[in-house]
């Protein structure tokens, strides 16, 4: 039962990792736009030389790219944790099966039997 759950966690973790990597590749290399999360309006400042208009279009782009990268890194780390959990479950199950398959429990285990684990 733990083997199935372990393999399922590994697959889900790898899917999350590949999804985040492909999404970041599409946005940062293929130049597809990231989802607009932040929409800043232009700033109008009153100076001694008169009103000054500061455009925020580039700031919107940088903020959206930063938030997108942060979100994708979070998904990447979540996939890493899930895959690691699945691997540890499989490792524990394999050790448990190997210990059960030892024929002589009273004899001292040799180094070769530990290498097979």
Image: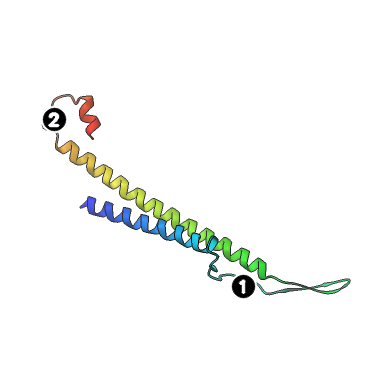
Can you tell which quarter of the image residue 13 is in?
Answer: bottom left
Q: Residue at x 69, y 70 (%)?
A: 56
Residue occupying the far front of the picture: 30
Which badge, 1 or 2, is on the more N-terminal residue? 1
Q: Residue at x 27, y 43 (%)?
A: 91
Report the side of 18 relative to 96 (left or right).
right
Horizontal and vertical percent position of residue 10: 32, 53
Mark 1 is surrounded, within 10 Å at the Cα level, by few (under 14), some (14 to 19) or many (20 or more) other residues, namely few
Res 105 label: 2
Report the side of 95 relative to 40 (left or right).
left
Can you tell which quarter of the image residue 12 is in?
Answer: bottom left
Relative to 116, residue 13 above or below: below
Relative to 25, residue 88 above or below: above
Give the spatial CA distance, label 1 vs label 2.
Answer: 68 Å
Residue occupying the far left of the picture: 103
Res 76 label: none
Horizontal and vertical percent position of residue 116: 22, 33
* Nearest the eye: 25 or 77: 25
Mark 2 is surrounded, within 10 Å at the Cα level, by few (under 14), some (14 to 19) or many (20 or more) other residues, namely few
Q: According to the image, label 1 marks what residue?
A: 39
What kind of element bears circle 1? loop
Q: Residue at x 26, y 42 (%)?
A: 92
Q: Residue at x 62, y 67 (%)?
A: 61
Relative to 95, residue 16 above or below: below
Horizontal and vertical percent position of residue 52: 80, 73
Horizontal and vertical percent position of residue 71: 50, 61
* Nearest the eye: 100 or 79: 79
Between marks 1 and 2 in the image, the one whose residue lies nearer the viewer:
1
Can you tell which quarter of the image residue 65 is in?
Answer: bottom right
Residue occupying the far right of the picture: 48
What kind of element bears circle 2? loop
Report the side of 59 relative to 45 (left or right).
left
């Amino acid at each position: 039962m733990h083997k199935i759950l372990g393999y399922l966690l590994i697959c889900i973790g790898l899917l999350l990792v590949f999804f985040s990597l492909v999404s970041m590749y599409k946005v940062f290399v293929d130049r597809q736009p990231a989802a607009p999360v932040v929409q800043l309006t232009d700033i109008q400042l009153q100076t001694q030389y008169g009103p000054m208009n500061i455009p925020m279009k580039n700031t919107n782009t940088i903020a959206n790219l930063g938030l997108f990268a942060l979100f994708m890194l979070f998904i990447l780390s979540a996939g890493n944790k899930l895959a690691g959990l699945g691997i540890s479950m499989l490792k524990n199950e394999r050790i448990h099966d190997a210990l059960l398959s030892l024929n002589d429990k009273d004899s001292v285990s040799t180094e070769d039997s530990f290498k097979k684990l």
